[in-house]
Structure formats: C-alpha cells, structure tokens
Amino acid sequence: MKRHAPDLIITTAPFLREGSSTPELMRQVLLATIPVVAAGTWFFGFGALLVIFTATVGAVAAEWFLSGNRSGLGTLADGSALLTGILLGLTLPPPIPLWMAFLGGAVAIALGKVIWGGLGHNIFNPALVGRAFLQAAFPEPMTTWSAPVSSWFSSSSPYVAVDPRTFALPLMRVKTDVITAATPLGLAKFQGKGTDLWSLFFGNTGGSIGETCAVLLILCGLWLASRRALEWRLPVAALSSVFVFSSTLHLIDSTRYPGPLFMLLSGGILFGSVFMVTDPVTTPITRTGAWVFGAGLGFLVVLIRIFGGLPEAVMFSILLMNAVTPLINRATQPRTFGY
Amino acid sequence: MNDLLWIFVSAAIINNFTLTYFLGLCPFFGVSNKIDTALRMAAANIFVLVITSFSTWVLNTFVLFRAEYLRLIAFIVAIACTVQFVEMVIKKTSPALFKALGIYLPLITTNCAMLALALFQTTRGYGLLQGQAYALGAGVGLGLALLIMAGIRQENELVTIPKLVRGAAMNFFIAGILSMAFMGFAGLFSSH
Amino acid sequence: MIGIATAAAIMTGMALLFAILLAIAYRFLRVEEDPRLEIVEGMLPGTNCGACGNPGCHAFAEALLRQTAAPGKCTVSSPTQVDAIARFLGVDAGVEEKRVARLHCGGGYGLALRQAEYQGYSSCRAAVLVSGGGGACGWGCLGLADCERACTFDAIKLNDRLLPVVDVDKCTACGDCVEVCPVDLFTIEPLSKRLIVQCNSPLKGEAARKVCSVACDACGRCAADAPDGAIEIVNGLPVVKVPSLTSERATFRCPTCAIQWVQGNQFADDTVAPLYEGGSIASAILSAHREDERASRG
Amino acid sequence: MTGLLQAIRKSPQPTFHHGVHPEENKGRTNRLPVARMPFVGEYVLPLSQHLGAPSPPIVVPGQRVERGEAVARPGGFVSVSLHSPVTGTVKAIELRPHPNGKLMPAVVVQADPFASQRDQFPAVPDPLLSARETVLQHIQSSGMVGLGGAAFPSHVKAKVPDGKRVQFAVLNGCECEPYLTCDHRVMVENPGDVIRGFQILLSLVGAERGYIGVELNKADAIAALRAAVGRAPLPIEILGLEVKYPQGAEKMLLDAIFHREVPSGKLPLDLEIVVNNVGTAAAIAQYFDTGKPLIERVVTVTGDAVSRPANLLVPIGTPVSAVLEHCGLRQGEARQVIVGGPMMGLAQKDLDVPVLKGTSGILAFTSETVRVQAEMPCIRCGRCLDACPVFLNPSRLAMLVRTESVDELERYHLLDCFECASCSFVCPSSIPLVQLMRVGKGLIRQKKSSK
Amino acid sequence: MEATREPSAQRLILSLSISGLVAGIVLVGVYDVTYPAIQKNRAEAVKKAVFKIYGEHTKGFEVFLLGSDHKTLQAFDMSGGALPEGSTVFGAVDSSGQLMGYAVPAEGAGFQDTIKILYGYDPTQKRIVGMEVLESKETPGLGDKIGSDAKFRANFTALSVEPAIQLVKGKKSGANEVDAISGATISSDAVVKILNRSLDQWRPILAAEAAKKSGAKER
Amino acid sequence: MATKMDDEEKQKLYDEFVKGIWRENPVFIQVLGLCPSLAVTNSLMNGIAMGAAVLFVLVCSSFLISLLRNVIPKPVRISIYIVVIATFVTAVDFTLAAVAPDLHKSLGAFIALIVVNCLILGRAEAFAGRHGVKESVADAIGMSIGFTLALCLIGGIREALGNGTLLGYSLFGPNFEPWVIMILPPGGFLTLGAYLFLFAYFKERSEEKKQRQADAARNLTEGRRAA
Ligand SMILES: Cc1cc2nc3c(=O)[nH]c(=O)nc-3n(C[C@H](O)[C@H](O)[C@H](O)COP(=O)(O)O)c2cc1C
Ligand SMILES: Cc1cc2nc3c(=O)[nH]c(=O)nc-3n(C[C@H](O)[C@H](O)[C@H](O)COP(=O)(O)O)c2cc1C
Ligand SMILES: Cc1cc2nc3c(=O)[nH]c(=O)nc-3n(C[C@H](O)[C@H](O)[C@H](O)COP(=O)(O)O)c2cc1C
Ligand SMILES: Cc1cc2nc3c(=O)[nH]c(=O)nc-3n(C[C@H](O)[C@H](O)[C@H](O)CO)c2cc1C
Ligand code: SF4
Ligand code: SF4
Ligand code: SF4
Ligand code: SF4
Ligand code: FES
C-alpha cells in the first residue's frame, strides 16, 4: 500500500472548513465602500474621487514598501491595505491637498499597521491613525470643508471642477480665498444653527467625503451584516449608546443639547459605526466586550461633541476605545463552561 | 466646585501629565509592561501625589512665603522625605501593602511628576483643595496612561512586533498615538 | 542679611529633620544583604539559562556565595570570566569538562522515508501530534527546528538535510534543546565522548532499514568490535557504556553508518553517504520552512 | 441578515450554546444498510486500542487462535481483553503502525483461509439475572469499550464507585460528525439491540430513567427507537435534538438535555449521570445474546475518493487499505485518508494501519475536498469564541501557545478544551487552532512534569 | 568591603545639615545676584504689553493693588523694582504723567490649557482698548492666533463691554461683538469668556476709581 | 614609564568622554531623561538651551560629588546628591531668568525639573559617586554633550517640520504648510520613536554588511583550501 503513500497530506482536524476567508471578508467590505465612494463623488465632485484615490495609493505604496514581503503582491493580496486607504480617503475633507491625502495613507499603514507587525496585530484603527495624524498635523486644511456640488452642469461649480487647494505642491499650501462650508455639527456647535434631517439623511451637507449620506451608509451596513462580514453588535451598541446619551441630555435641556436623531445622522458616527467600529482587528473579540466598546464609544462621542472643544469626536473616540480594547478583552473573558 | 472639577478633568485627561506634559516618562515606560504592575504603580502614584501636594502646600504656605528661592530645593527634599517616611511606615505597619506598592515608592521619588505637581500648584496659586483636586487628577491621568499602555504592551507580547521597532521605539510610537487620541479631549468643559 | 539667616535656618532645619528620619530608618529598617551578591551577579552573564542547575543567575550567585556551587558550573561564562569570579570569591573555579548536546538521529531529508506531507503549524512539537509527522520513522527528527529556535545561544542550525547541527563552540550544555525536542533526540554528552549513535529507533533488521537508510538495524557489529562490554545493544540500539573510548574501530563495520566517530560538530564532514540525491530539494524545503516561519513569527 | 436572525431567534429544540453547523454530507451513506466486510489475509491487533493500560498478550507467535478467542488479557482494572477476529495463526507480536501515527506493539494474526470462521461463541449468563460483579467481569472480558470514539472500557463506566449514585443514564445517538452514519444505521437497523443494551446498562448503574439523545436529522432512527422502546421495562425517553456540532460531546449533550454543566475537571458521574454511545449499547446486547465478544464493529467508509461508499461491519484489525480497496478507492487520487470523522479524526500517512475498536469512520478525500489554505494572521474576528462550546478564547490561547506563555495558558483554561475543532472550522484565517491547543497542552504537561 | 562599616547617626545628621546649610547660603547668594535682573525682566514684560495696548505715547506704568476691602485700589511703589504679589492692575501713563487707562491681567481655561491675557480697559467709555496674550498653550497655527492674528486683535481696539462681550462668527455688527477666528472658535470664545469674567470683577472697582479721579479733578 | 601611564590615563579619560556621546547616549541608547527631551524640544533653540543647562548642572554636580564621595556617608548619599543638584539647578534657573527671560519662559518648569531628571541623578549615583574627579567630569561632559546632541536632533526636526524654520530662519518659504503635530506632544513621541527606529535600521544594515563581508572572506579561504 506504500505505492501512493507519498501523495498523502497530513494535517490536523478539522478536515472541513466553513466558507469565508479573511481576504474574502476584506473583499466584501471593499464592495460595500463602492457605493459610498460613488456618493462622495456625486456630492463633492471629481476632486473627492481624486482624494480617495490618492489616499489609497499612499496606503498601498506604504504597505508594499514596508511590509517586508515584496514577492508578487505580497501582503497586498489580502486587500486590507486597499481597504484602509479607501476608508481613510472617505474620512477626509473634500478639498484637502492631494499630497496630504497621500501622506495620510502612508502614515496610516506605516504607523497604524506595519510597525505593529502587519495585519491583525495593530491595536489602533490604521485609517484613523492616519486621519488623526493629518488632523493634528494640518488642523486647518483638515477642518476646511466645501459645500456639496449644487449641480453637475452649473457653470459655478460643476462636478469636474476641482478645488485649487487640492493641487497644492507637496509640503505647500495654496492661498486662495475659496468658498468654504461648515459641517452640520460645526454649525450646531459654533453658530447654533440646525440642519434639516432630510439633508442629513440624503447627504446634501458639508462634511467628510464618505460620511454625509446616511441612508446609503445604513444600507451598506445592513448588507454587510447580512453577509456576516461584520459583527452587528458593535455598530448597534455604538449607535444605541449615542442615542441613549444624547436623548438623556436632550430631555434635560432641549434648547442646549441637540436631539438624538441629529446626533446620529450628522458627522461621522454612522460611517464610523459601519466601517470602523466593525474593524475586527481593533475592537474587542468578546461579545460582551463589543457592548462595552459600543457603550463607551457612544459616551465619548456625546461627551466630546457636546462638552468638548471639537465639533466632531468620532475619530478620537474610536481611537480611545481602541486603546482600551486590550483591557476590555481581558475584563470580558467569557465564563468557561463548567466554572 | 466647578473649578475643582475642571482642575481635576484638566489634569487627568485634557492635559494628561504623561501624554501631553511629558512628565514621569521614565517610570511610565519602565513599569508599563504588565497590567498588574501598572495598576499598583498607578495606585502608589496617586497616593504619593496627593501627599506631595499636601506637604508642599504646607511648606509653601507656612515656611517658604518669604524665601521663593528655596522652593525647588525645599520641595524636592520634602518629597523625598515624605516618600521615604511613607515607605517606612507602610513597611512597618503592613508588609502586604508594602509588597504591593512599596517597591515602587523609590521609583516615584525621582519622578518628574511629583516635583512638577508641586511647582505647578504653587505657580498657579492653587489653594489646598484645588491642589488636592489637581493631584488627584494628575494621579488618575498618570494611572490611566499607565494602564492603557500596559494593556497594549501586554497584547503586543502575544504577537511579533518587527525587530526594528521592538522595545523603546515601539513604546514611543504607542505613546504618540495615544497622545494623538487624547487630543480629542482638548477643550473639554472649557466653554461650559 | 535676613535672607541668609532665613535660608540657613530653613535649610538646616529641613536637612536636620530629613537626616534624623533617615538615621532612624537606617537604624531600624535596614535589610542585611551581602554586598558581594550584587557584584557576583554582575559578573555572571545574566542569560538566566539554567545550565548551572539554578533557576537563573541570581540564584546561582546566591549559591556561589553559600559556596554550594562552584563558579565553573556556569558554562556560559568564558574560562577567564569563571576565573575572575573564582578569584573574587577566593574559591576554586571547579571548571568542569565541556559538554555539548548531541543528536541521536541521522535520518535527514533524503535518508529517512517520508510517507506523507505534513501541513500545519511549523513546529516539531505540533507536527508530532499529527500522525507523528510525515516521516515513516516514529523516532526520527522532524526537521521543523524547534531546537534551533529554543537555543538561546544560537548554537543550532539546521543543515541541508534539515538535521540540527550543534555548534560545539557555542553550545553551553544548557539543555533547552533536550527539553524542547518532542522525540527526545538530544542528550548532553562530554565533548570527549566521540562515539555517537545517530539513531533512536528500536526497530531491528529489515524493518529498520526499510524506514531509513541510516537507521541502526541492531546488527551488533559495533558491540563486537568495541572492547569488551564497552558497547551493548539494548532495545535495538547500541549503548556506549565507556564514554572515553579512544578508538573509532567500533564504527568500521556499521552497515548503515548509524554509529559515528564525531570530532567537533556532528554532520560536519558529510560522512554519511548521500544515498538519495536530495540536497537541492532539501534546501528548497528548508527555505520554504524558513519563509513560513518568518510569515508566522514575523 | 441570516446571522442577525439566527442570533435573535431562540432555537425551539433543546441544544447547547455555541457550536457550529458543518455541512452534513451524510446523504451518500445514511440509507445504505450495514454490509459485511469480507475476510482478508492479515489482521493487526494493537495491544493498546482503548484508554487505559495496554493489554498484555496471552498468545505466542505460531499459536493457532479461533475467531473470538482472547489474544490478550486486561492489563489492569481500566483495561479490557482483546480477541482475534478470525480463526488463524499468530504470526508475530511486534511494532506495527497505529492510527495515532506511532509504531505500537500489536498481535498479528494470519487468517486461515480454510477455516470456517465460527459464528458460535461460548454462552454467557443472562445479565439481568446475574450478580452485578459477574456482569461487569463479563463485559470486561468481552473487550467492550465505548464505540463513540474515546474507546473507554465500558465496565469501568458501568461500575458506579462506592459512595456515588447514578440518577440518569444517557445514550448518545447524536452522531454529530459530518459524513458518519454508523450509529445512525445501528439505530435504524437494530433498535431492539440498542434498547436492550440500554436496559442492561440502566440496571447495572441503578439509574431511574434513561434518555436517548438523537439529532433531528435522523428522524427514521428516532422513529425506530420509539417503536422499540414501547416494550422496555425501565422508563426510556427518546429526545430529538437540534442538529449542531459537537452535540455528541457528552458535556454538550448533558447541557442540551438537562441544562446542567459538568464542572471543569469533573465527569458526568459527578452530576449522577452516565453517558454511553448507542453502538456500545447495541454491542453489549449482542454480546449477552450471542456470546460474541467485541471483534467487529460498524464503520462508515465514504469521501469523494471512494467510489462505493458503505456502512461496513468490519472485523477489528482489518487494514484500512483493505477496507478502502473494498469500497473502491480511487487509486492515485486520494490525497487524504482520515480515520474517524472529519472534525476529530486523524489523518493517516500509512494506510496499513488497522481498524480499531474506536474507529467509526474511514474517509478518503481527493484534492478537491482537501483545500489546504495558507494560514493568515488572526484578525481577532471572534468567530472562534462564538464557536467554542466551552466558551474559551481560542484566538488568545493560540497566541499564548506560540509565545509559550504556559502560566497564562492555564489561566485561560486551556485544559478545558476538548479539541472539538469548532474553532478551527470557523476561523477565516485558517489558523490551526486545535493543533495549537494540543501543543499548548503538551507545554503545560511538560512544565508540570519538570516541576 | 569597607562600605559595610556603619556610619554613626551623628555623622549622617551632621553631613546632611552641613550640606543643607551650604546649599542655603549658596542659593541666597545666587538669588541676591539675579534678583534685580529678574524683577526688571518681569516689569519689562508688563511694560511691553502695556505699550502694545496703549501705543507709542505710553511712557510707563503704575501699579495698583486691590485693597483689602476688595473695592478700592492702592498705588504700589515700584521703586524697589519688584512686582507685588496679589491682585494687581496696571495704569498706563503717558509722557505727561497722565493716566491713560488701566491694563488688567486675567486668565481662564482655553482650548488646551490656561490662557493668560492683559487687556486695556477704559472705565469712562466702558470700552476695551486692547488685548495682549501673555501666556497660552493653544495650538500653533490655530488657537495661538488669538495673540497674533491682526484681524482678531482689531476686535479689541474699541470694544464696548455693554451689556457684555459677545462672540459671533462671520459678520460683526454690534460694538460689543468679537468676530471669532475661523478654525479657532474655542480659543476665541475663551478670550471672550475670560474678559467677561474679569470685567465682572473689575468694572465696578475701576469705575469707582475713575469716578474718584474725575471727581477729584473737577473739584 | 610615566608617559605611558599618562597615555593610558588619557585614553581612559577619552573613553569616558566619548562613550556618552554615542555608544551610551543617554537619550537614544539608555532612554533616560526623557521628560525634557520631549517636552522642550519643539524648537532647536530650546534643545540647545536645555542641553547647556544640563551640561552645567551635570558637570558641576559630578565634580562636587566625586570630590566628596569619600566623605559622604552612604545612607544619605542620595539626599545629599539631590541637595547638591537642586542647588545648581536653582542657580541655573535664576540665571536664565535674569539673562534670557524669553528662553526661560519657553523652557518653563523643565529647567527646575532637571533636579529629578533621571539622567543626572543616575550619573551621580552610577558614576560620580564611584569614580575620581577627572573621570567623572569627563563622563559628565560626554554625557551632556550626548544629551544635547539628542535634544538638538529632535528639536531640529520638530522645528523644521513643525514650523518650517530652524533657529527661527525660514526654511521652505512662505507657502510652507507646517506640520503642527510636530510641535504638539504626539510629535515629540513620534520623532523620538522614529529616531530609534532609524538607528536600529542602520545598525542592522551595518551588521548585515559585516556579516556578508565575513562570509565572503570565509568562502574565499575555503575556496582556496579546496583548490
Ligand atoms: C468615521 C469618521 C470619524 C471622524 N472622526 C472625527 C473626529 O474624531 N474628529 C473630527 O474633528 N472629525 C472627525 N471626522 C470628520 C467629522 O465627521 C466632521 O466632518 C468634522 O470634524 C466637522 O467638524 P469641524 O467643524 O472640525 O470642522 C470623522 C469623520 C468620519 C467619517
Ligand atoms: C467533539 C466530540 C464529539 C463527539 N461526538 C460523539 C457522537 O456524535 N456520538 C457519540 O456517541 N459520542 C460522541 N463523542 C464521545 C462522547 O463524548 C462520549 O465519550 C461518548 O458518547 C461516550 O460513550 P461511549 O463510551 O459508549 O463511547 C464525542 C466526543 C467529542 C469530544
Ligand atoms: C490638532 C487640533 C488643534 C486645534 N487647536 C485649536 C485651538 O488651539 N483653538 C481652537 O479654538 N480650536 C482648535 N481646534 C479645534 C478645531 O479647529 C475646531 O474645528 C474649531 O475650533 C472650530 O472652529 P471653526 O468652526 O471656526 O472652524 C483644534 C483642532 C485640532 C484637530
Ligand atoms: C468589517 C471590517 C472593517 C474594517 N474597517 C477598517 C477600518 O476602519 N480601518 C482600517 O484601516 N481597516 C479596516 N479594515 C481592514 C483591516 O481589518 C485593517 O486594515 C486591519 O486593522 C489591519 O490590521 C476592516 C476590515 C473589516 C473586515
Ligand atoms: S531534533 Fe527534535 S526539535 Fe530539533 S528539529 Fe529534530 S525533531 Fe525538531
Ligand atoms: S539549547 Fe542545546 S545546543 Fe543550545 S546551548 Fe543549550 S544544550 Fe547547547
Ligand atoms: S477545539 Fe477547544 S478551543 Fe476549539 S472550539 Fe473546541 S473546545 Fe473550544
Ligand atoms: S476565528 Fe481565527 S481569525 Fe477569528 S479570532 Fe479566532 S483565530 Fe482569530
Ligand atoms: S526625566 Fe525621567 S521621569 Fe522625567
């Protein structure tokens, strides 16, 4: 019987596997970003697409050069670097200089992922590390927003026209007096002005490229959940927590504190909940942990948005919760059977 | 009361002693490799900070009001002295507590955070209560940073960090990212 | 000059207070510790390898001070370092004969029969759990380098046949490899012991040879050729009873080269006839293993 | 949406928490009646086929043995006899490959091609009328072990230690492993034997009530058992359980039936329950009916590399290669041969290994089914935590094993892992988690012994 | 090893006391030498700020201490060169020795940390006439514009404090309104809050003081 | 004979001096005295000033401590070191406030905090307290130069990127977009981390090169032997 023996493969059980693989997961999330990219382009013009593309190139280039495996596609094959780049691009303001987008992508991968040892090892969400770096480095460009393109064909701001700031030379800025817009949260915080919920719902407001269209984000999230590509507890916990904390404040004083619907539909909370809170690597592994993470996130978002200096808090809150995720994981170990 | 709260929150998170003031970094990097150690160090820190705040306030108010130029030397001696005294007392009265916290006390004596606390509370003219709030905030902030750092470092031990950044470089990168994250707290409660 | 007076008063007062406190502390709460301990520990290599039989260098230093151990027990320190410690403590160095780890398997790639391809966690301890690894011999080296990784002194490198070669200069006889090998292939032997049986399989005769071309088939020729009683066949394997044999005669008639006269490193000169031409494949596999390992361990 | 719905919906059938739903793949064999495997030339009987002390041989090479004659005696209390499955001569007692990958001592019996291979065996007393001790002794000398996989000597389980009592007995008819259908066929074809065997066990342990847990994908088995139970004197209940792996693991089964957890490090006996496999019960009944010791068992042979899958009654000691050949192994196409089920079985490198008392299946797969995926880093997705029926954190345990943090491993309860492989099954990064668990257990053992 | 010999307690106490004594004496020496320069620097810093607020006509400044009744000001003699401790305001004096207005230090929480400012206040017109940032840790390029941004500073050249100072974004319409720096609304807001809070304390005092002065002149 | 002794001693002093500059650089290698290294280095000037202050304090205190090391009783040595150091620090503090008030303001409390800088107390305890005056001073100078060097490297990068200037001179022209993060706290951590990474990288590169050369040499000799 030894005739065919050397062909045999020996491995440990199990000899069956459930379908999905990690690269496949990444592919599904990538698919889910496509409509969001499209919407961003629709609202903010061709320049927005350029920004996303450049951020992605930055991330992919950094991954390829730094990850130490440059044979073939190397670690790009799993698609996570591509995803990081796109997600970073989607959280940037539309008129940001391209060189900053590129730098952000590179920092996201270098500081957010490669130094930790690559996929799966990082504690902080790489895309948000990149964004936080940009925000701290270039606070002004990172808080300068453009208004949504009013019409594709109008002569004043057609969607093919790109904001001159976008093409600033590397390390430089373009000094022009351009029209800027405020985000709904900025308007609420600093000028006490509201934005109507329908605009928020359909995304016809100022803001980061990918965050404005609430309805699309909700649909993408539901699709991902139905494909079991994300852990539904995390976004549900985060959103409910924002709801609970903001309603409580709203009930206390509705003139000072905005209502929960506004809090949920404005800013990056929906985008973050669908695409970032769900990053498996940087969020708790335990199910109880997922609830704790979401609750903490919502608390921080409401705290900083309402009592903090900044109008928006999603990025910082996610990073802060990422930081305590190892502690959450430890504290929420499930009770072992039979103990 | 509001004032005390702001002093506390400011010292604990907005102007975190470790992550935005760069105080007590040596022990911060030194003992943040295990959650357990970090917790104890944090407890010892809070304890000593509160005592330091008190003793230097007493010193400043009743002894040094006429001799500003002796502040530094007097504070440092006072800190060293109180810490040593506390250490002795703990050692004598509760060996268990000493084992849990005492071994960190010498580390704390020569920690910038203690002296900085004493100096800051003096230059800011904090009264006794404000000083205590400040010390408590600073201690909580140091403890928070230590605990988070320890959690992350202990997690990192389970995976392979690239050789070139393993060790000190990685710790600085982590601290850098944490420091970026803590920037989110800027301005908290300042306009309310 | 009121300033000077105040300053002097305050400073002296504080210093006094401090000094008194310290004096009290010094009197009542001092912990006795032999000051030599720190010095001796500083002179030790600090690798905490345990080769000396103590749980780490600190414990060894304590043992040295108690004089329950001789400095020479530390096999990591160079002779001059050992000497320095001995002189410092005023004791005999007690240098022991150098011992090294020896491998009892010669069935590397191309020599021992491989029945199946193992896939999974690249580690001997893991592979042995899967049908005992892909090799036909249940006692042989699995070639997945657990020992190489375990050796803190970088003394082990797998060769082209995926067999671990112990660098006798670097090996400190710490025994980590002995402990880690799931098929117990290493023993610690005096360097002067030259006759090494490079097989661990109790199979005899045809059964043994079918599995591995360099297996000991327990034919008994080595025992017959060695001085009386120096080698004995126990459980299908020769046991060298007299470690200090000076003649390599016992190896001459071994049909499978399973017993070897080793000087320096094992497998240093390719005394084992390459029965299969597997060198290049082996190195390909080796590099694949290394890749895997790098991928999984970074 | 399915994931969401699943989480929200509370399952109506009794079951345990967590676990996985592998594809069943039972369709090719679950309607095939048990057939007899023809005799072959040589039988290999490893002396260690059960948990416990190996059985010392009582024959010498060259000695003639009858079918059903003992060739080895129990090596202690936790040990059983071993019988020759054929009439023939003892060829040798030597090291032979064992399905666990090692070479182990075995009695090799050369079958006598001209012998009659008797069907009559020495008579045994009626178990319901004899003294408990006698019955137990007979069970031991019949070579009876659990046929559910672990091959634990049955008489040991049936002997309730002094000071303990047993309230319930459970028969395990889950057969949650995909592909396997041997228990299924036994329940369908010999429900009477199962019930009678169970009655013997119930009276031996003094239980007041019996339960048979069967997964709902075996409706015909449930029906057959229900029909057979009507005539039984002690109360026996047949329970349909949700189809989920590893329902058959006894701790999970007890959780499903009684909603009680067996404490860590304890046995079902500590809950005053004993669990046996349905096949074991049937074999006990058959032994007391005919006097035939445990010399053959039902084995499912399937997988895409065999052209004639079957449920075979195989004499113990038959080489796996012969069984596969009988079932039409696609020579040259088989890339993986597994003894046992696809979740817990062992891959074989040498097909001359024998069928053992605990062998419930032989699977042969071609490269189409054997997908060896490259391992990726753990992305901490938590699916393994959701799968693990004992609520461990396999992801963390795997990392701890790789870094050899033995103390932490114990703190995270590695020793409670029973290697069901649910975690590896779901891991999207193809991490060999169970294997790492086993390595980790080795590390703990090593550390304990070096202490 | 010699170190194991135990030094006597007296020696410990003695050596520490001596070192303390020596240190004290040395420090007094250093202090005496540097004291005048340091005080001069402090006064210089105040002077510079006052100059910036009141322009080139400024000649010098006077120092007033809040009296123990918390209601009246007392002139402080600066001939010693040192600024006093306690609540102070400064008076800007022109070349004719005429008091041009007050310069009031104030502080409060900013975006990052405490912001310290000095503002010029004219009690008769109830107007702020200038504002200088003495110390802040606001973000360079954003929050620190409160000290450097000309447009923002221009808000304070003639800012009415009645009924209170108001922060607006974009269009400044009222005399009591301050236009926020875009990108640094928080810091701008902080300055306004600090001013309002400080004015609450000082307005009555300075108004009374001014009334006293003008009354004295008229009389 | 005598000159030989001198030479040897000079060599030893020289060794004590250089080691602190690179081989045992307090910041990059020993990772000590971090607080000021990060807190004040948002400009090159601050780095230089801090370095100078540390130089003064470290040299003076090392001198005094090594001079008195046999007189100081062991149990109170740390306290006395602190008193000595604190005296010098206060002196520097006041002098700076008198001479360069702006610099004094931008260094803030960190001048005072030199007292508890782990580097200084560490040197006092580990070196000056156990060595002669000459060695201690050589060591102190070397260490503080190493410290200053590190502060300048960090401060230089942070000022250049964070402000577009070096010692106040514009580097990139008026349209430069400053990287504000560099002068904010995270920039300090990240810059030091990046330096440590770069050093590790170059060290590994040079080691690899050495290894390759050694291998090549070995192959050469072996080839010869074979031929
Ligand atoms: C997922 C996500 C997270 C974000 N997190 C933050 C954040 O933490 N802080 C922030 O200022 N902006 C964040 N943004 C951008 C904001 O949502 C928002 O557009 C901007 O902050 C508006 O506030 P501003 O007035 O600073 O200018 C985030 C965007 C997304 C999509
Ligand atoms: C993961 C796992 C799955 C198991 N599945 C079954 C099963 O499907 N049927 C079964 O009878 N025993 C199964 N067992 C074995 C049982 O736990 C238990 O040992 C057995 O039912 C006892 O009966 P026995 O001694 O008669 O074999 C399984 C064990 C494990 C660990
Ligand atoms: C790194 C960073 C630093 C900031 N620094 C300041 C600051 O010093 N002062 C301030 O008022 N806001 C600061 N901000 C807050 C934002 O710029 C915020 O969007 C702004 O206060 C809102 O003003 P706007 O509505 O005019 O844009 C900072 C934000 C970031 C991300
Ligand atoms: C559901 C899901 C969400 C993800 N979200 C992010 C993200 O927010 N940011 C990011 O950099 N990568 C994201 N990734 C990709 C990947 O997990 C990430 O690059 C790792 O953190 C890198 O180790 C996501 C992946 C999945 C499957
Ligand atoms: S000697 Fe042992 S540990 Fe080393 S490679 Fe061989 S099997 Fe593995
Ligand atoms: S691990 Fe083995 S080879 Fe390495 S030093 Fe220890 S005994 Fe020698
Ligand atoms: S193999 Fe162990 S860890 Fe994995 S699911 Fe089963 S019991 Fe849990
Ligand atoms: S299933 Fe795999 S990838 Fe997911 S957490 Fe578990 S080990 Fe990691
Ligand atoms: S310099 Fe070391 S703790 Fe601050």
Image (tube, rainbow, N blue to C red):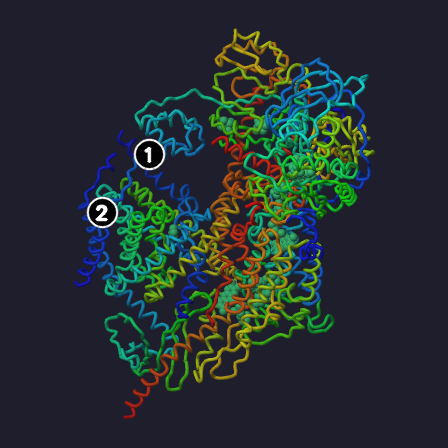
* Amino acid on which the number 1 mark rests in the picture: Leu
Q: Secondary structure at mark 2?
A: helix
Whether residue E217 sits left or right of residue F47 in the image: it is left
Q: Nearer the viewer, residue D297 or D282?
A: D282
**In this figure, which residue is indicated by the disc labeled 2?**
C23
Q: Residues within 10 Å of mark 1 (few under 14, many from 20)?
A: some
Give the percent coordinates (x, y) of residue A174. Answer: 59, 66
Q: Quadrant of residue B118?
A: bottom left
> Residue at coordinates 58% horizontally, 31% vertically from top-left?
C145
Q: Chain of mark 2?
A: C
Examine the rendering and report whether any part of residue A84 can be seen. Answer: no
Where does the N terminus of chain D fall, quadrant-wise? bottom right
Q: Looking at this rendering, what residue extends furthest in the bottom direction? A: E219
Give the percent coordinates (x, y) of residue F62. Answer: 29, 46
Q: Nearer the viewer, residue B185 or D20?
A: D20
State the mark number for residue C24: none
Please determine whether, in this image, residue C124 is positioned above or below residue D20: above
Give the percent coordinates (x, y) of residue A46. Answer: 69, 64
The quarter of the image that holds ligand 5 is: top right
Please determine whether, in this image, residue C246 is positioned above or below residue E27: above
Q: Residues within 10 Å of mark 2 (few under 14, many from 20)?
A: many
State the mark number for residue C37: 1
Give the percent coordinates (x, y) of residue C77. Answer: 41, 28
Q: Mark 2 and mark 1: span between their CA atoms?
A: 25 Å
Q: Nearer the viewer, residue E109 or D376?
A: D376
Q: Quadrant of residue D222?
A: top right
Whether residue B99 sits left or right of residue D137 in the image: it is left
* Amino acid on which the number 2 mark rests in the picture: Ala
Examine the rendering and report whether any part of residue D379 can be seen. Answer: yes
